[in-house]
Image (cartoon, helix red, strand yellow):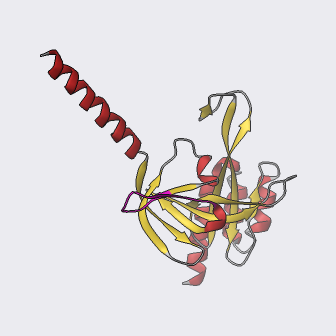
Amino acid sequence: MTRIIFLFLIILATSTISHAQTTNFVNGYVVTTEGDTLKGLLRKYRYSAKPSTVAIFQDKTGKKTKYKPKDLISYKVGTDKYETKIYSRPGLSPIVAFMKVVIEGHLTLYSQAYQSASMPIGPNPIPGGTDIQESYYLEKQGYPLFFVKKMKFRKEIASYISDSESTINRMNEEKMKYTDLRTIVNMYNNDMRKQND
């Protein structure tokens, strides 16, 4: 009887470890710089900063491939889409990284997660004294990426979306802030759709 219980525990432990290793991977695809779309499984990271540096793809045979931003145009893991972008933040050299597509449209909102060396506080603290922070970028068709700053927020955004007077007026009337960025992007995209109809 002891052998049967022991054998059962070994089988249970092995299946649990195997399941834990495969649950990190979800359906998705990668689009290579050659324009090929490869469907398979991609690793879904617990912390949102990791996808900016590497995408781990597993094909139907179980072979895993690591892709860096220079290798891909975009990839999708589950419902999250990432695109390769060249961006810069004040005081830093340009960086090539995967950026998460937050809102797609005439004006696309991207987020770039990064780890800051700080006390482990905030919504996603990582052991070891780092914290996940997010920067936001806008990209209008035909324009370069625009880093969204918290300082002088309305003034800077108004300059970037100057082709939508109704969005700027509402943004100023309602005294919208950095935390209203998604709403502003949606308002702008709705206005652009109306203008083009």
Which x, y percent locates residue 190? Answer: 56, 70
Q: Which residues are magenta?
A: 57-68
- Against 75, residue 141 (above or below) is below
Residue closest to the eye, 54 or 120: 54
- Against 136, residue 188 (above or below) is below
Residue drawn 56% across and 72% down?
Answer: 32
Which x, y percent locates residue 51? Answer: 59, 52
**Residue found farthest to the left:** 1
Say which quadrant the N terminus sits in: top left
* Residue 17 found in image quarter: top left
Q: Is residue 156 left or right of residue 72?
A: right
Magenta region includes residue 105:
no
Which x, y percent locates residue 133? Answer: 68, 42
Magenta region includes residue 65:
yes
Residue drawn 70% across and 59% down?
Answer: 137
Q: Is residue 39 left or right of residue 129?
A: left
Observer able to see residue 188: no
- Against 140, residue 67 (above or below) is above
Residue drawn 80% across and 54% down?
Answer: 89
Residue closest to the eye, 141 or 161: 141
- Against 18, residue 28 (above or below) is below
Observer able to see residue 134: yes
Residue closest to the eye, 140 or 180: 140
**Residue found farthest to the front:** 3
* Residue 85 found in image quarter: bottom right
Say which quadrant the C terminus sits in: bottom right
Q: Is residue 197 left or right of residue 149?
A: left
Numbered circles on residues, count: 0
**Residue found farthest to the right:** 91
Which x, y percent locates residue 162? Answer: 76, 71
Residue drawn 81% across and 58% down?
Answer: 155
**Residue found farthest to the bottom:** 197
